[in-house]
Image: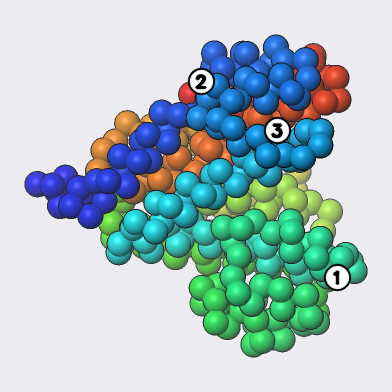
Amino acid sequence: MEGVFFNGNNGYIEGIVRGYRSALLTSAIYSNLTQCDTLEDLKLQLSATDYGNFLANVPGSLSTSIIAEKATQKLIDEFRYIRAQAVQPLSKFMDFITYAYMIDNVALLITGTLHERDTHELLERCHPLGWFESLPALCVATNVEELYNTVLIDTPLAPYFKDCLSAADLDDLNIEIIRNTLYRAYLEDFYAFCKNLSTPSNEVMASLLEFEADRRVINISLNSFGTEITRDERLQLSPKFGKLYSSGTEALASADDIEQVRITVESVGAYKGFFDTSNNKSLEDHFYLREMELCRNAFTQQFTYSAIWAWVKAKEQEIRNITWIAECIAQNQKERIQNYISVF
């Protein structure tokens, strides 16, 4: 019966998203891409997939950045299409997905302005899904209070900013602290929202967001080595949920070296092997592998919003894969071309 009500408002969108999922590149297609000798060959191979003629109107010679930009634009167009069809609570769920990009855009603009980068160039690098009307005004903010009162107070990020107002002047360290504080508040809010969704959306999204929280906690611990960030500040930046919470989070906040981090992380069964570098995979690679495993599992469920999250993450990984392969071809580094993370 739950499925009947779900399909009334969301069945069309779920069908579209599962169609998008079916169009993701397969292992056989990746194998063909890795055999390409030039970017024109890559373009030809991609034209036989769902990407079609997405590079048809590119003037001049192809570059890796153009391929990545056009592939990302395809994701954005598809996301905006299904967002336009959504009603509550799915529309709010999709808005939550965009908040992460908003946080990244805010951090990018403040950092770039601090280092006197060209404003136009910074705005071009902002992710379109995280765009909001007052974003360009971030370039004139000189302190945290001004940043909030003149720019962010009318954006969806405003509720997450209350814990940042105590931060000192804008510098590299404080900007990173602001970014992680915003992410923590955002993930906790998104997690609480998903808990109130119907089954199985609440269960699947809980596992996806718990991994996202754990990944941030691990990175916060590793990136804090050699900085002035204290144990209490690490805890303050860490989301208060996840498989590592709370004993693991506290242990990571107190960790002084990578070995302590490894022991704590690998105490969770799903995270064993994250620090294994024998197969030439970095910690970041292991994160992506685990994320894709969770996304594949999310697609096995029906009547769930989690398919949209899983599709966005899988599509982003696919774009990273295409960009990596294109870069290896352009740089003539064919011996490293197989180092991508397979999606399906």
- 315 over 38 or under it: above or below: below
Q: What residue is disc 2 on?
A: 26
Question: Which residue is depicted at the point 33% across and 58% down?
Answer: 86
Q: Earlier in the sequence, mark 2 or mark 1?
A: 2
Question: Which residue is depicted at the point 51% across and 49% down?
Answer: 77
The reply to whether residue 87 is in sight is yes
**Residue 190, how many percent across, how many down?**
43, 61
Q: Quadrant for residue 148, please give it.
A: bottom right
Q: What residue is disc 1 on?
A: 114
Residue closest to the eye, 282 or 108: 108
Q: Quadrant for residue 308, please give it.
A: top left
Q: Earlier in the sequence, mark 3 or mark 1?
A: 1
Q: What residue is disc 3 on?
A: 323
Cα separation, mark 2 vs mark 1, equals 42 Å
**Residue 75, how many percent across, how many down?**
54, 44
Q: Earlier in the sequence, mark 2 or mark 3?
A: 2
Give, as a three-letter code, the residue at label 2: Thr
Q: Quadrant for residue 282, please give it.
A: top right
3 or 1: mark nearer the eye: 3
* Local secondary structure at mark 3: helix
Residue closest to the eye, 213 or 155: 155
